[in-house]
């Protein structure tokens, strides 16, 4: 915050089957009871998933930036490490700030998770078209499994992120006063360990992104691109 329960082929086949339905039925299947008063006030699952996906992509970028900045410190240590250290400290701070957004968004999705599928149950109860209902029932288990996998992967990322960020903060504090070659060499063990933790966090975020892509694809309205 890597696990693909819904394959790309499966998503494409699902979309092909959905294209057999009239446009109105398609919109109902893909977006649920969006015409109800409650749905207008509450974000739809697709809106939530897209927003969370954007935050995951941001987190991936910030982790990459922090790891790259850490590499630069070692590379530039034999010359003037101070600019590289300053870039590293800035990247760590940015990661601290953005991690709060990711944590808050993850908690919000976890809190609303049950409501997504309760809403789906209520929708199915009112569907009269047999084909529409059948397609909705077919997609519900895949969406739920993928949602649960995304939550599980997010939790793993959260657990791995804490020690990763802690190591980054330790390095920032140790090197702040004197980011010299000797001081950096003395921290080689911690630097290598931090990089390893960062790579694992990055892999976990890849898992979350894969599941978010699957869910947003299954909930894609007709005539729109998957990455929207």
Image (cartoon, helix red, strand yellow):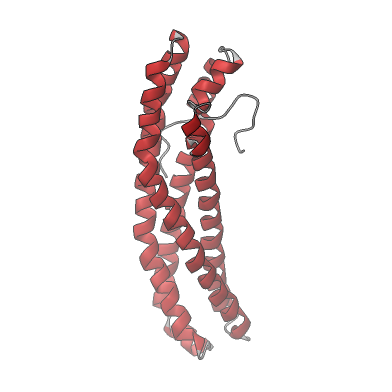
**Quadrant location of the C terminus in the rendered image:** top right
Give x and y (percent) for residue 28. Answer: 52, 21
Who's the residue at 46% across and 9% down the image?
129
- Indicate the position of residue 15 as horizontal and vertical percent values: 54, 22
Q: Residue at x 41, y 64 (%)?
A: 196
Q: Residue at x 40, y 73 (%)?
A: 167
| Residue 214 visible in the snapshot | no
Q: Position of residue 48 (x, y in %)?
A: 49, 42
Q: Nearer the viewer, residue 107 or 123?
A: 123
Q: From where the camera sits, is residue 199 visible?
A: yes
Q: Position of residue 63 (x, y in %)?
A: 51, 62
Quick check: 61 above or below 228?
below
Q: Is residue 146 above or below residue 170?
A: above
Splitting the image into 4 quarters, where does residue 82 fall?
bottom right
- Going by the picture, which residue comes out furthest to the front? 37
**Marker count (numbered):** 0
Pick the residue in front: 183 or 18. Answer: 18
Kindly identify the residue that appears in the image at 44 percent across and 46 percent down: 208
Left or right? Give the position of 204 relative to 82. Answer: left
């Amino acid at each position: 915050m890597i696990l693909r329960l819904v394959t790309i082929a499966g998503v494409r086949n699902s979309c092909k089957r959905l294209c057999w339905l009239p446009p109105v039925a398609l919109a109902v299947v893909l977006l649920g009871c969006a015409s109800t008063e409650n749905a207008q006030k509450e974000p739809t699952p697709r809106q939530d998933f897209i927003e969370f996906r954007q935050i995951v992509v941001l987190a991936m970028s910030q982790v990459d930036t922090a790891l790259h900045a850490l590499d630069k410190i070692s590379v530039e240590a034999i010359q003037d490490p101070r600019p590289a250290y300053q870039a590293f400290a800035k990247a760590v701070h940015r990661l601290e700030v953005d991690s709060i957004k990711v944590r808050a968004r993850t908690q919000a999705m976890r809190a609303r998770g049950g409501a997504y599928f309760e809403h789906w149950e209520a929708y199915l109860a009112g569907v009269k078209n047999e084909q529409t209902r059948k397609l909705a029932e077919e997609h519900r288990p895949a969406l739920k499994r993928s949602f649960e996998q995304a939550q599980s992967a997010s939790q793993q990322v959260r657990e791995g992120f804490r020690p990763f960020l802690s190591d980054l903060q330790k390095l920032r504090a140790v090197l702040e006063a004197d980011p010299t070659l000797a001081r950096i060499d003395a921290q080689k063990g911690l630097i290598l360990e931090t990089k390893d933790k960062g790579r694992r966090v990055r892999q976990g975020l890849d898992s979350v992104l894969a599941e978010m892509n699957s869910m947003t694809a299954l909930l894609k309205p007709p005539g729109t691109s998957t990455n929207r």
